[in-house]
Image (cartoon, rainbow, N blue to C red):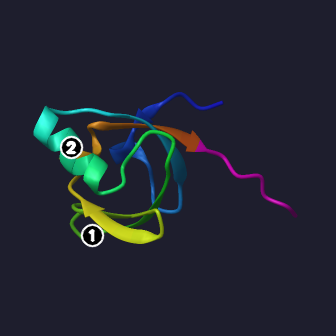
Amino acid sequence: MTKPMPLSHLKPGQRATILRVGGHRPVRRRFLEMGLVRGETIFVKRVAPLGDPVEYVVKGYNLSLRRADAGRILVQPIHEERSG
């Protein structure tokens, strides 16, 4: 099993489960209002050409976050079995 890591470390195409949302209270509240809650699955859709922001999919909608903000969210990567 992979160790928990900041959301900002995931690559496009990876999925993860949110473990903890950090930051000061107003920042945490904003994340929670956007659906970034513990236990939710998040998918890295794509990265902007210059590397920031990053587009994620959570609860069926697209969400763009700066890498600095994504670094405040601790996730557990999900490794999907590939059939072949």
Determine whether the residue tagged by mark 1 lies in a helix, strand or loop: loop
Question: Residue beneath label 2, please?
Answer: 29
Which residue is painted at 77% across and 52% down in the image? 81
Question: Residue beneath label 1, please?
Answer: 48
| The label number, if any, that marks residue 23 in the structure image | none
Label 1 CA crowd tier, 10 Å (few <14, some 14–19, many 20+): few
Horizontal relation, residue 76 to residue 7: left or right = right
Q: Position of residue 2 (x, y in %)?
A: 59, 32
Q: CA distance from mark 2 to mark 1?
A: 25 Å
Which residue is painted at 37% across and 71% down in the image? 62
Marks 2 and 1, the one that precedes in the sequence: 2
Q: Position of residue 76 (x, y in %)?
A: 52, 37
Q: Position of residue 40 (x, y in %)?
A: 49, 48
Compared with 61, 4 (above or below) is above
Three-letter amino acid code at disc 2? Answer: Arg
Q: Which stretch appears magenta?
A: 78-84
Determine whether the residue tagged by mark 2 lies in a helix, strand or loop: helix
Horizontal relation, residue 29 to residue 21: left or right = left
Contact (CB < 8 A) between labels 2 and 1? no
- In the foreground, 11 or 43: 43
**Quadrant location, the N terminus:** top right
Three-letter amino acid code at disc 1? Answer: Ala
Magenta stretch, main secondary structure class: loop
Q: Position of residue 25 (x, y in %)?
A: 15, 34
Which residue is painted at 85% across and 61% down in the image? 83
Compared with 45, 11 (above or below) is above
Q: Residue furthest right?
A: 84
**Quadrant location, the C terminus:** bottom right
Residue 67 on the magenta segment = no
Residue 82 on the magenta segment = yes
Q: Using the rendered view, name the quadrant where residue 35 is placed.
A: bottom left
Label 2 CA crowd tier, 10 Å (few <14, some 14–19, many 20+): some
